[in-house]
Amino acid sequence: MHSLGILLSGRGSNFVAIADSIDAGRIRDARIAVVISNKADAPGITIARQRGLNAVVIPSKGQAREEHDCEVVGALKNNAVDLVCLAGYMRLLSPWFVRQFPRRILNIHPSLLPAFPGLEAQEQAFAYGVKISGCTVHFVDEELDHGPIILQKMVQVLDSDDEHTLAARILEQEHIAYTEAINIVLDGGFQVDGRRLKKTWK
Ligand code: GAR
């Protein structure tokens, strides 16, 4: 049984999608061992509590990154987490944090990386005038929105879109993509060659 640790800072819809996938058997042989928020008022942490999950707030405000990361890693290890899923966790992890879980930290980002890393990726893409955007699930490395890509989903930008309708359609794809990516990583049927993830199953 795999133990997932979810890190979030806000709404938590990707966390809910992952939890629903586990409950529905779309992600097998896994449980959410802990949900950690760096913000006490994150709606996602309230939902985690309502669902009876182990929900922990470790405030980041006013704390040095290394100190905060140390507490978060401690909570993940105390709960025997073997896969960390960043789900709208709006903090860069320190290199030390990344080294604690080699190739076991995933992030989802609402653009086709390497386009539009950072904040408000959907708005950035819309303002740039792209015709295609989407989302990316990738392994986390020491740079922002950067590690090897596990999978991407494409979303067409329509003439009728504004940044909100585009973001909503990207979010639908995020929820599907995260479950698929977790299954790829948990099944282990892949190898990472430089930046390229290649399937090793037929
Ligand atoms: C999602 O769109 C996620 O891709 C994005 O934050 C949102 C969180 O929503 N993450 C990033 O931009 C990471 N750079 P959620 O709290 O409803 O899952």
Image (cartoon, rainbow, N blue to C red):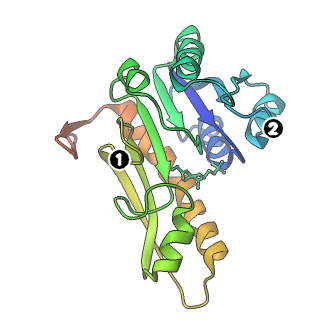
Tag on residue 146? Answer: 1
The numbered mark, 2 or 1, whose residue comes first in the sequence reads: 2
Element marked by disc 1: loop
Rounded to the nearest whole Å, what is the CA distance between mark 2 and mark 1? 28 Å
Q: Amino acid at mark 1?
A: His
Is 153 positioned to the left or the right of 121 in the image?
left
Above or below: residue 68 compared with residue 194: above
Q: Is residue 174 left or right of residue 197?
A: right
Is 42 left or right of 181, judged from the image as shown?
right
* Residue closer to the observer: 79 or 38: 38
Three-letter code for the amino acid on which mark 2 is drawn:
Asp
Query: Observer-nearest residue: 160 or 3?
Result: 160
* Residue 156 drawn at (x, y percent): 47, 78
- Residue extending farthest to the top is 78
- The local crowd at label 2, few if under 14, some if 14 to 19, many if 20 or more residues have their Cα within 10 Å, is few
Q: Name the foreground residue: 95 vs 44.
A: 95
For the point 29% across and 44% down, the residue is 148
Residue 88 lies, in percent from the top left, at: 59, 45
Q: Position of residue 195 (x, y in %)?
A: 21, 45
Quadrant of the image occupied by residue 21: top right
Which mark is on residue 55? Answer: none
Label 1 within 8 A of ligand 1 by Cβ: no
Residue appearing at x 69%, y 44% in the figure: 12
| Residue at x 53%, y 86% (from the top left corner) | 158
Tell me the quadrant of the picture where the C terminus can be found.
Answer: top left
Q: Name the quadrant containing residue 68.
A: top right
Q: Residue furthest bottom?
A: 159
Q: Position of residue 75 (x, y in %)?
A: 60, 14
State the residue position of label 2.
41
Which quadrant would residue 20 be assigned to in this image? Answer: top right
- Dot 2: element: loop
